[in-house]
Image: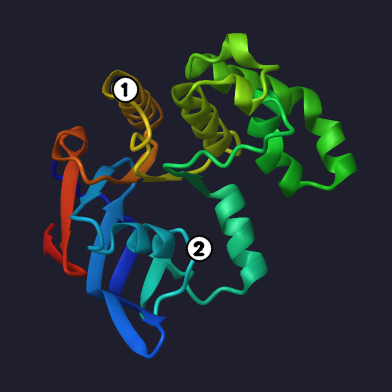
Amino acid sequence: MARTTPSQLEAIRLAKSYRKGPVTIPVLQAVSLSICRGEFLAIVGQSGSGKSTLLHLLGTLDAPDCGEIRFRGHRIDRLPAAERDVLRNRHFGMIFQFYHLLPELNTLENVLTPLLIRHSVWGYLRRRRAYRATAVQLLEKVGLAHRLKHKPRELSGGEMQRAAIARALVAGPEILLADEPTGNLDQATGQEILEILGSLNQQQNLTIVMVTHDPAIAARAHRVVRLVDGRVENV
């Protein structure tokens, strides 16, 4: 699908290497990528091609060796750690192959954690009714209205991923970064998760950047970018 709107998130000639003992292993090499508001983009490639590394750089979870990352035209890869934390809390939602739910909290409490992190205790308490209503609404949207009080150990893999999606969305992000969001799920449950993501993209104009190794999953996106040996093959 062609897009003519300005870039919302942009990578400019990113390079990233890791050291393993005395050996330097290049992962990304001069990767450039432009993502428009409301786009559903899939990043594909074989294991080790740099897909997850690229996603982590876009989300400022890691820093490139060289190159730039820009959000709304402003450079973000060199922001201080505290400002990057705020950026992720307010503007980027993230979901991963592993759900990272806190085992001691129930589903609703897990979803509310980004808002607890954002505010002081008193700031959160002043808004808690509105925040709880938002979290419940999101859990209804992802089909977990009947699981609000259940702990992660009481949920299936698909239910935990649904909870992780709701948590990623509760703060109203502009961009959702998803790293193999169906990787630990059976085919039917994975399709349900993709339906949820597609609905969010279409109904809320949510920008989604999704890493996957599966061409059939990538086909659900507007556009597919392929990484081969740390380089963009096709955009």
Does residue 49 sit above or below 117 in this rendering?
A: below
Q: Residue at x 37, y 75 (%)?
A: 68
Give whichever of 195, 153 is nearer the camera.
153
Give yes or no for contact between labels 2 and 1 (Cβ–Cβ under 8 Å): no
Horizontal and vertical percent position of residue 117: 73, 47
Instruction: Indicate which disc residue 184 carries.
Output: none
Give whichever of 85, 110 is nearer the camera.
110
Q: Residues within 10 Å of mark 1 (few under 14, many from 20)?
A: some
Give whichever of 3, 31 is nearer the camera.
31
**Looking at numbered disc 2 in the image, what kind of residue is underneath it?**
Leu
Q: Residue at x 14, y 40 (%)?
A: 215
Residue 72 visible here: no
Under circle 2, the secondary element is loop
Residue 54 visible here: yes
Q: Residue at x 53, y 38 (%)?
A: 168
Residue at far left of view = 234
Left or right: 117 as drawn, with respect to 88: right
Left or right: 148 as drawn, with respect to 3: right
Horizontal and vertical percent position of residue 14: 31, 75
Residue at numbered disc 2: 61
